[in-house]
Amino acid sequence: MSILVALVLFGLAAAGAVKTLHGYRDGRMPSLLWGINTPTFSSVTSPDWFWRAGAINTALVAILAIGGVVGLVLTLVKR
């Protein structure tokens, strides 16, 4: 795994974290698992799905960030 791949994983994690944080602040949580037509869940009309989407987004961001760390460590250990 190259440093470029690790940086791409970090970039995706950062973008997902920003989107999740803005959704939390706005009270409308987008789901990061969908493509372009992302459904958003309101904290007022569907609070259960709001928090579920937030948990899924957080888990996805954590997986991407951990993948970036592992990729960076493996790349640096190879050298």
Image (spheres, rainbow, N blue to C red):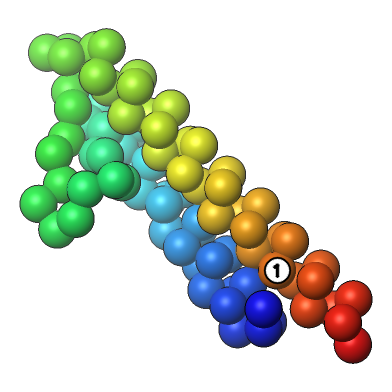
Image position of 33 with respect to 59: above or below: below
Residue 35 image point, x, y percent: 19, 55
At horizontal 46% and vertical 63% (from top left) the residue drawn is: 12
63 sits left or right of 21 in the view = right
How dense is the environment of label 1, judged by Cα within 10 Å: few (below 14), some, or many (20 and up)? many
Q: Can residue 26 be seen in this view?
A: no
- Spot occupied by residue 4 in the image (x, y as percentages of width and height): 60, 83
Splitting the image into 4 quarters, where does residue 3 fall?
A: bottom right
- Tell me if I can see residue 18 in this picture: yes
| The quarter of the displayed image where residue 51 is located | top left
Question: What residue sits 63% from the left and 72% below the top?
Answer: 6
- The residue type indicated by label 1 comes to Gly
Residue ID at (17%, 23%) = 42
Residue for point 87% across, 82% down: 78
> How far from the left and from the top, in percent, is residue 13?
51, 56
Does 55 sit above or below residue 65? above
Where residue 11 sits in the image (x, y, percent)?
51, 67
Does residue 6 appear to the left or right of 31 in the view shown? right
Could you say whether the residue bearing mark 1 is in a helix, strand or loop? helix
On the picture, is 53 further left or further right than 56?
left
In the image, 28 versus 66, the foreground residue is 66
Judged from this view, the residue extending furthest toward the bottom is: 79
Give the quarter of the image for residue 49: top left
Which residue is the site of mark 1?
A: 71
22 or 62, nearer to the observer: 62
Quadrant in which the N terminus appears? bottom right
Q: Which of 14 and 75 is in front in this view?
A: 75
Look at the picture and state if 27 lies above or below 35.
above
